[in-house]
Amino acid sequence: MSYYGYILLFSFLGPLVLSFDKKVAYYRKAPRLVLPIFMVSGLFLIWDQWFTERGIWGFNLMHTAHIFFGKLPLEEILFFVVVPYNCIFIYEVMGAYFRLENNPKLNRLFFGVFFILGMLLILQQPTGWYTLSSVLFAFALSTALLIFNPKWLSQFVVSFLMCFVPFLIVNGLLTGATTVKPVVWYNPAEFSGWRIITIPVEDLFYNFDLLVGFVAFFNLGNKRLAL
């Protein structure tokens, strides 16, 4: 198995085993992941393919199994299944154990800081495709969330913050924290150059965009099942 494959496998094992926790019972909700994987992951894979074709980012062959779909290695396809599964697991744990009420003050504080960070990134690199696409998409989603104020918004905010630790581990491994050459490389002309250790700060916004879509469709599936 490739290095990228091992990263995905070990990041997936914990949530998979804990999915059988009686209070969370995440395994019973697996059918609700089908719609988000199809709709959201499909969109992000198109985005991923387009950026890879244009050299905005790319993958080191030495860390993959050399099985490609278009320009994307198999492991990258699986990334858009494993990571959302793990993040929605954290979202469900927050709901099952803490039953978070929607808190407008918390939401405004989070999105205020988020908007400031995004603006700083754009000012740092106003022409970078990765910076502009990830940040502006996040701004659009954030605005929609604040306007419609879904009842799960604070649960999402806390879950996103809780995902920060596994985010640092997984993205750090992918961006070269423990290897001479990273699994995923980034064109320096297309992002701000700001990093959290080895991770482009734009990855925070990219992961936010991904997780918002998954939580929204996941909850939509819940409403349909409730009918």
Image: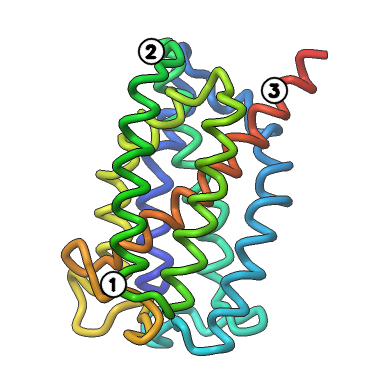
Give the Cα separation between the discs numbered 3 and 1.
Answer: 40 Å
The quadrant holding residue 93 is: top left
Give the Cα separation between the discs numbered 2 and 3.
Answer: 18 Å
109 horizontally vs 17: left or right: left
Q: Give the structural element (helix, strand or loop) at label 3.
A: helix
Residue in view at x 34 percent, y 75 percent: 125
218 horizontally vs 110: left or right: right
Q: Give the structural element (helix, strand or loop) at label 2.
A: helix
Residue in view at x 65 percent, y 38 percent: 33
The amino acid marked with disc number 3 is Asn
The amino acid marked with disc number 1 is Gln
Residue in view at x 48 percent, y 18 percent: 24
Residue 48 is situated, as x and y percent measured from the top left of the image, at: 57, 72
Task: Find disc 3 in the rendering and name its residue.
Answer: 222
Task: Find disc 1 in the rendering and name its residue.
Answer: 124
Picture quarter with the N terminus: bottom left
Please tell me which of labels 3 and 1 falls first in the chain. 1
CB-based contact (under 8 Å), mark 1 and mark 2: no
The mark closer to the camera, 3 or 1, is 1
Give the Cα separation between the discs numbered 1 and 2.
Answer: 40 Å
Mark linked to residue 97: 2
Q: Nearer the viewer, residue 80 or 1?
A: 80
